[in-house]
Amino acid sequence: MKWLYLVPGLGFVAIAGVFFFALRQEAKSPEAPLPSALIGKPAPKLELAALDRGFQGFGPRELASGHVTVVNVFASWCVPCHSEAPVLATLAGRGDFALYGLVQKDSPQKIRGFFAENGNPFQRVALDADGRASIEWGVYGVPETFVVDGRGIVRARIVGEITPEVRDRQLLPAVEAARAL
């Protein structure tokens, strides 16, 4: 009968072991992408309003206009967004894809300050003031970047800051793959 007192303890040790093993497996591949329901599907059918009169917004028509588009979701309050700005600047004006910005939960005044400090690499900048468009895109947090092919199909999602390494190993290969479709 005394062995019955060991059953709860052994059960706890077994469950703790399973969780420990699962966490160690996840830690081995920290760059594993978060799943995205949009990969291989059309970009959300949203007409995104321009940041203000000095910019152009975008929607399904622009995303399916025959060229690859990189959509970067960012905000002025996002520290990694400031860090990735110089890397995004290296992508400005490239002829092989369009670079669009989607401002999440921010104001035009603060974004103008962000651009004054960091430059504006984007051809179009849309404002998602309440975060609803970001939800449609499946954004977990800023920054996030999406590669959309010339037919408006989402082909890749990059979560986190675009560093030179991420640009070279993930973003540009995803653009090339989308161009090949």
Image (spheres, helix red, strand yellow):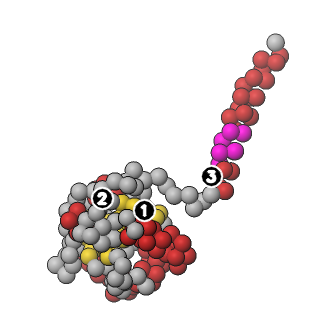
Image vertical order of residue 8 relative to residue 132, above or below? above
Q: Amino acid at mark 3?
A: Glu
For marks 3 and 2, the one nearer the N-term is: 3
Q: CA distance from mark 2 to mark 1?
A: 11 Å
**Quadrant where the C terminus is found in the figure:** bottom left
Is residue 19 in the magenta section? yes
Question: Which residue sits furthest front?
Answer: 180
Q: CA distance from mark 3 to mark 2?
A: 29 Å
> 74 and 172: which one is in front?
172
Residue position marked by numbered label 3 in the rendering: 26
Q: Decide: few, some or many residues near mark 2? Use Cα within 10 Å; few <14, some 14-19, many ≥20.
A: many
- Residue drawn where x is 82% and y is 12% of the image: 1
- Residue drawn where x is 40% and y is 55% of the image: 39
Residue position marked by numbered label 2 in the rendering: 43
Residue position marked by numbered label 1 in the rendering: 156
> 142 and 36: which one is in front?
36
Asked whether residue 101 is in view, the answer is no
For marks 3 and 1, the one nearer the N-term is: 3
For marks 2 and 1, the one nearer the N-term is: 2
Residue range of the region highlighted in magenta in the rendering: 17-23
Residue 77, horizontal then vertical, whole percent: 39, 72
Q: Amino acid at mark 2?
A: Ala
Question: Which residue sits furthest left?
Answer: 53
